[in-house]
Image: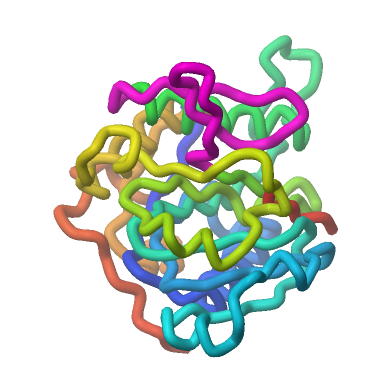
Amino acid sequence: MHLISLIQLGTVDYATGLRLQQQLVALRKEEKIGDVLLLLEHSPVITLGRNAKASNVVASPELLAQRGVELFECDRGGDVTFHGPGQIVGYPIFDLRGFATPDGKRKTLGVIGFVRRLEEVLIRTCADFAIPTKRVAGLTGVWTDVDAREAKVAAIGVHISRSVTSHGFALNVNTDLSFFNLIVPCGITSKPVTSMQQELGKPLDLNTVAESISRNFGVVFESQILWVETLDTLLGHAVGVPMQAPTELRQLHKEGDGTTWV
């Protein structure tokens, strides 16, 4: 069975997370590591893609500083988004040549098929917590489906280079939604942003949600998920072994083409 190594990193600033992705993508392209799924939280950051409109950051620099929010320009496509505490960010570093299409006609999963699978993982994860969600025609991501009210609970964006993916998804679990008032999320003004906490009226344990994400990745990508304790274990080229999910989100110490968030 196909194997995906999963590492929980805890809170990582955006620049460190981006640098780590770049390193893992290079190793994956060289086939020095297998497929990897990173789960983490970012310290508060607003990211602007290549197509971002500056006007979609509605907060002043003074207010951003007051809220402790970093402003980060990056080379991905798309517009403006927010990452912060209480939000599980997932970065799959996958070689899509290892995943066939459902009909078996193609040996390599395409970008649309990959994004649809990410949406399916998140739809199933929300369902595990009795939150009905759906896709919205013409838009990417996962949306609540309660009393005809559509609110975005998860954003998805991917970068694919030589069949290897990076970037990924952001699931609002216990996210402080007031941070989204600082921006026009993804340039969409007609639909609000929500969180699992807001939908349920209570906070959730992030590790429990991470375990659900793990299970659903295993089902949707027809893979075995191997929880890897540390980056050193992975980068030392050791083979991950199945183990219980860590009891606490792990901290990553700050040591040393076509991406779209929608």
Q: Is the magenta stretch mostly helix, strand or loop?
A: loop
Q: Indicate the position of residue 159 as horizontal and vertical percent values.
A: 73, 53
Q: Which residue does the image show at 43% across and 86% down from the upper left?
A: 66
How many numbered badges does the structure rendering display? 0
Q: Indicate left or right for 147 with 252 as reference.
A: right
Q: Which residue does the image show at 32% across and 65% down from the upper left?
A: 10
Q: Indicate the position of residue 231 as horizontal and vertical percent values.
A: 38, 67
Q: Indicate left or right for 113 with 40 as reference.
A: right
Q: Which residue does the image show at 51% across and 25% down from the upper left?
A: 149
Specify whether residue 129 is painted magenta.
Answer: yes
| Residue located farthest toward the top when viewing the structure as drawn | 103
The quarter of the picture where residue 137 lies is top right
Q: Indicate left or right for 63 with 58 as reference.
A: left
Q: Indicate the position of residue 214 as horizontal and vertical percent values.
A: 37, 37
Q: Which residue does the image show at 35% across and 30% down from the upper left?
A: 215
- In-front residue for pair 184/88: 184
Q: Is residue 200 above or below residue 36?
A: above
Q: Indicate the position of residue 148 as horizontal and vertical percent values.
A: 53, 18
- Magenta-drawn segment: 128-154
Q: Is residue 74 visible?
A: yes
- In-front residue for pair 236/103: 103
Q: Is residue 39 visible?
A: no
Q: Is residue 20 above or below residue 129?
A: below
- In-front residue for pair 82/41: 82
Specify whether residue 198 is painted magenta.
Answer: no
- In-front residue for pair 99/169: 169
